[in-house]
Image (tube, rainbow, N blue to C red):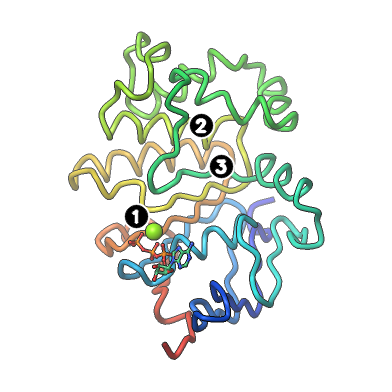
């Protein structure tokens, strides 16, 4: 399945409401299975908003978004929420870990909501707990005690790895990462990306990564400037 379309975005326009001008106006954007795409752009240009459109959290004012050949907005809200957790692992800009759950409970959440992601582990002959520990270890957190710690006790770098493990568990076809390295130094950033890519590669997951940090571009298959593809005049 390498090379088949994971994301197809066509003639997308988005504005917050009638009092706001158009924020996003993109003719086309594609991402294939297994591909690593980097989109860079300055703060406030609309990167997180674009990712919210791609994941169907926000509805575009016009245009079409297909994930794995399915038009997201042909689905009901409930179907769309399920489709998202089944097929997309998301690393949020602020990580969005659940503060009253421990590390294991946070990582395993997608398997609670998605039969498909849980089933994928069964096919791989892995149980959820062992896979959570394996992912954390492969992302650089090899101290097993961390699995039962509260997420609020973790450093930013550790929280980021928990967020990445949660996105990767159950091998979703697409991983979306919203500037998850912004709080880290350059060497740690690079190390994190290498580990993230290694895991994504083993599942043939596509990676869509947004950041303002253009120095990360060299680690990706393809780089796009948000400002170049966004045809808003404002
Ligand atoms: N809920 C909202 N209602 C109205 N405007 C919003 C809302 N959320 C964001 N915006 C505006 O949309 C624009 C794009 O914001 P967005 O968060 O997508 O930028 P970004 O490129 O991700 O920035 P950063 O690099 O700082 O994360 C900004 O001008 C922001 O103020
Ligand atoms: Mg953002």
Residue that lies at the very extreme toward the bottom in this rendered image: 233
Q: Are marks 2 and 3 in contact (CB under 8 Å)?
A: yes
Residue at 48% x, 36% y is 199
Q: CA distance from mark 2 to mark 3?
A: 7 Å
Q: Residue 95 lies in what quarter of the image?
A: top left
Secondary structure of residue under mark 1: helix
184 displayed left or right of 125: left
Residue 59: horizontal and vertical position, in percent? 65, 65
Residue at the spot of label 1: 219
Secondary structure of residue under mark 2: helix
Secondary structure of residue under mark 3: strand
Residue 17: horizontal and vertical position, in percent? 57, 75
Please name which of the two marks, 3 or 1, marks the residue nearer to the observer: 3
Task: Find residue 7 and name its label.
Answer: none
Residue at 33% x, 22% y is 141
Q: Nearer the viewer, residue 184 or 58?
A: 58
Residue 69: horizontal and vertical position, in percent? 76, 60
Residue at the spot of label 2: 166
Earlier residue among tags 2 and 3:
3
Residue at the spot of label 3: 89
Vertical position of residue 214 compared to residue 85: above or below:
below
Badge 2: few (under 14), some or many (20 or more) residues near its Cα, within 10 Å?
Answer: many
Vertical position of residue 189 compared to residue 4: above or below:
above
Vertical position of residue 31 compared to residue 196: above or below:
below
Badge 1: few (under 14), some or many (20 or more) residues near its Cα, within 10 Å?
Answer: some
């Amino acid at each position: 399945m390498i090379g088949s379309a994971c994301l197809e975005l066509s003639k997308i326009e988005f504005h917050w409401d009638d009092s706001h001008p158009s924020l996003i106006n993109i003719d086309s954007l594609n991402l294939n299975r297994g591909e690593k795409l980097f989109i860079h752009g300055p703060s406030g240009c609309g990167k997180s908003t674009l990712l919210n459109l791609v994941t169907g959290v926000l509805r575009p004012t016009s245009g079409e978004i297909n994930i794995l050949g399915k038009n997201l907005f042909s689905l009901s809200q409930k179907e769309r929420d399920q489709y998202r957790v089944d097929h997309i692992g998301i690393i949020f800009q602020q990580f969005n870990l659940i503060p009253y759950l421990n590390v294991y409970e946070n990582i395993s959440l997608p398997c609670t909501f998605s039969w498909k992601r849980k089933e994928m582990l069964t096919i791989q002959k892995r149980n959820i707990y062992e896979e959570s520990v394996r992912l954390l270890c492969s992302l650089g957190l090899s101290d097993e005690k961390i699995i039962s710690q509260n997420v609020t006790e973790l450093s930013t770098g550790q929280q980021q790895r928990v967020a990445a493990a949660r996105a990767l568990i159950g091998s979703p076809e697409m991983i979306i990462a919203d500037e998850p390295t912004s709080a880290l130094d350059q060497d740690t950033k690079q190390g994190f990306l290498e580990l993230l890519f290694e895991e994504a590669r083993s599942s043939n997951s596509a990676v869509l990564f947004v950041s303002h940090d253009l120095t990360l571009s060299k680690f990706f298959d393809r780089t796009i400037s948000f400002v170049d593809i966004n045809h808003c005049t404002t």
